[in-house]
Amino acid sequence: MDLPFMLIEMRDEQTVERDGRTLVHQKLVRFYLGKFGPFTERFEAGATSTDIGVRVEAVRATIRGLPS
Amino acid sequence: MTPFNPTALLVMLLTFYPIVSGGELLRARRERPEYFAGGEIIGRHFDALRLPDGVVWDLIFAVDGPGVPHWQAIQPGGGDGGAGDPAFALAPGPLVPIDLTTWPTPARADVFVPLVADAIAALGGSDAVLDRALLEGIGVLTGGDLDAVVNAELGGSDGILAGSHWILDGADPSDEIAATLGLDPRIDANDADYDEPPPPDMPDVPDPGGTPSPDTPF
């Protein structure tokens, strides 16, 4: 099954922890894999393309394992 | 908000949450809220999702049965996802990014400049009239002329102030100062004995009845 990666959105975001004081810096990635999606994943602010690719591949493997 | 996509939700659960339970579903809802499209986890075992439009999705198979639980995404009534309140129907997905080039930039419309220009033109040369009046006023009311006009119209304040100053300069407060030297600046609450007559005693309270005899039965 061909599941091309299509990036919809990638942005850095800051959220506040529950303690109300700590800022969490994250990278948000929204993408499609073929007709599946959108998938929205958050990574650490310093995540590399390899880190993102690993997770995308995990999602892709799950989709390929779905009964057709 | 990301439109709800049950397939994406199921894939996400299968990929990142290998342990199937209501607790893990709650954790997924907290960690990845976009997949849940604003819905809330419901059910006695936290195994279902109710979307804002009222549609319910069962997300755990055999959550309390004898079988092995696993993730699923089905509607209990067998619906197709479009059986919610039509007033809050979800947008069909997947959404595509908006092409901003299809939104033409509105042309700049000069609205206020023509309005002001027309209003000034309607005055018909009033600027010259106002300028002349201003110059005439400046020429008349300057320096001593202005003081003269104010004094004539308002009576002038210089004379009143001078008179007040003359009265204050001539006042001699020595008598008041001498009179206060013999006064005690303190207030003594025990300066004199209490000499008012005492209040009268309270009258005796009449006896409502005779004193019962010790032998009188109740």
Image: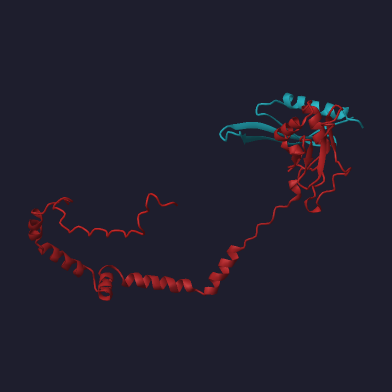
Q: Is residue B52 left or right of residue B173?
A: right
Nearest the eye: B52 or B96: B52
- Please give the name of the residue rendered at 65% of the width and 29% of the height, measured from the top-left corner: A45
Quadrant of the rendered image containing residue B65: top right
Colour of chain A in the image: cyan
Q: How many marks?
A: 0
Look at 61% across and 34% down and name the residue there: A18
For the residue pair A30 and B60, the one nearer the viewer reads as B60
Name above or below for residue B20 compared with residue B150. above
**Quadrant in the picture for residue A60:** top right
Q: Is residue B211 left or right of residue A44?
A: left
Q: Residue furthest right?
A: A68
Where's the N terminus of chain B, which quadrant?
top right
Tell me where residue B155 sits by quadrant.
bottom left
Q: How is the image coloured?
A: by chain
Q: Position of residue B206 (x, y in %)?
A: 32, 60
Query: Percent x, y for residue A16?
Result: 60, 35
What colour denotes chain B?
red
Percent of width and height locating residue B117: 56, 67
Q: Is residue B194 left or right of residue A9?
A: left
Residue B213 location, x and y as percent?
37, 52
Residue at 69%, 55% (x, y): give it.
Answer: B106
Question: Would you place residue B173 above or below residue B85 in this image?
Answer: below
Query: Could you say which is closer to the camera, residue B99 or residue B130?
Result: B99
Residue closest to the eye, B98 or A21: A21
Locate residue B51 relative to residue A67 in the image: left or right.
left
